[in-house]
Image: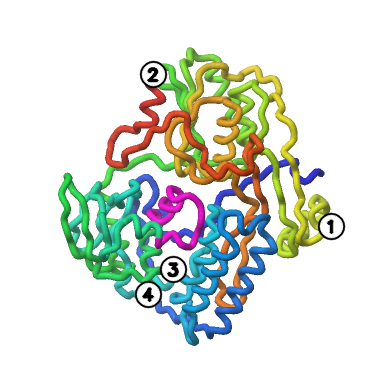
Amino acid sequence: MQPFDSLKHLPVMRLYFLFTVILLSVTIRSYAIVVDTTVTEKHFSKTQLNDDVSYLIKTVADVHPDMFHAVSKSKYQMVTDSVRNTFFDDMTGEQAWPAISRLIGVLNEGHSVFNYPDDIGDQLKSGKSILFPVIIKEFNGVNLIVRADASKENKLQTGDQIVSINGITSVKLIDTLSGYAGGLKQYRSLDVCRNLVVYLYLYHINGPYEINYLRDGKIYHSTLSSSTWSAFTTRVSEIAKTLPKSLPKVDHSFYISEKNVANLTLNSLTAKPAIFKNFIDSCFTIIKNSPTKKLIIDLRNNGGGNSVLAEILLGYITERPFRMTGGVKWKVSQDYKDRIRGDTSQRMSYYLNAKNGTLIENKGGNVQKPIANPVRYHGKVWVLIGPRTFSSANMLANTIQDYKLAKLIGEPSGEPANDYGELIVIKLPNTGFNFTTSTKQFVRANGNAKDQHPVIPDYLISHNPLSPIDEVLDFANKN
């Protein structure tokens, strides 16, 4: 088998917590209250922390195809020195995490992430009043939009815009709290909003919380107390009872509207290829047998998966020649060999036999026309994208853009079209902290490896989080 017969482009790994996953579903649902626990903090010597930093830097250099693609060596050394200068003997993991995480964040790559400490869940459930009691919907570029106030004061309303917390502006908070990861700001802000409770705790922004917020064009101020885990979850359960129920998020959905517009929503590309192909084939069979005026494909909440699925989809909307990537560079390292050795040894022998430190390269091949397809759609196609369009979904949007296979609507995607993937998780020997980073570089479909921009839509339409109308979808329906 050749090195890149099947490109798999996985979304960023995140260690989300139970309550953040639940709170960030379409509605806030009730869930069991977890009993508070007692946590014994781990302490580390200055030597142990410095050794972990050295291990981190060496390992990233070993496995990553281009560690300094977004930061100079001199700047990285400056950050490293500043991180080391924060260390002292008997330092706790809670104190060390924000500092060490900067060494991954400064790489400025969306797939390189310093993950939460393994014991963070126990820390948050320790029984102490340490939780920020407000659930955030999203960041609008200036302010944090409130989803619900779970504080005992209950001052904030859904839709209020938080201007600052403890004197720190929302813009500054997003920049500070996303220091654990790189990538474009719009994508980093999504993760911060999903997990603001966790990040405020990790970065030691504690209560009482002095909140300045915007409501109906006027600035207000409230002081909110921090909350225990049990009080927070109890309050969230009460709030959930007052909210309208909505359908759970699904990976794929399809329908044809009363105005004969076909709507295909793809929230992931993680299904088995055969199952995905059967689903797509059934959708396009319905389209072929219906008086369809246009097709809208929604990728705005698609975090990626397997690029093979993206290629399957394109075979149903275009007969133009294309390629999914302009090339791949795969770093050979002992760490990655250790990961894949075993059941895949025979299939991956070309990698296992390659010299550590070298690059296995593929130039992307020539553009090719998709095979004949009896249910291919030849009408108008709109593709919706935004900051949550990531990884192989971003690759799909880029291919559509570079080869003009359809028109893109919405906001810029969540990462550059020239991006990285094929992830590996590395654990630091002393603290036990772990991080995710890339072993492959993917060149955008047209082969321009120097373009560091995200996928920019043909029609730039921003969604107002306070509006009941989906402006992006509305534009597609009307045009």
Per the image, is 276 magenta? Answer: no
User: Alpha-carbon distance for marks 1 and 3?
Assistant: 41 Å
The residue positioned 59% from the left and 39% from the top of the image is 395
Residue 258: numbered disc: 2
The first of marks 4 and 2 along the sequence is 4
User: Alpha-carbon distance for marks 3 and 4?
Assistant: 9 Å
Residue 154 visible (yes or no): yes
Residue 468 rendering spot, x and y as whole percentages: 28, 35
Q: Quadrant of the C terminus?
A: top left
Left or right of 407: which side holds 368? right
Q: Tell me the mark number nearer the camera, choosing from 1 and 3.
A: 1
Residue 126: numbered disc: 4
Q: Which residue is mark 3?
A: 121
The first of marks 2 and 1 along the sequence is 2
User: Alpha-carbon distance for marks 4 and 1?
Assistant: 49 Å
Q: Amino acid at mark 3?
A: Gly
Left or right of 357: which side holds 130? left
Query: Dot 4: what SS?
Result: loop
Name the one closer to the observer, 222 or 277. Answer: 222
Residue 17 rendering spot, x and y as whole percentages: 44, 61
Q: Amino acid at mark 1?
A: Asn
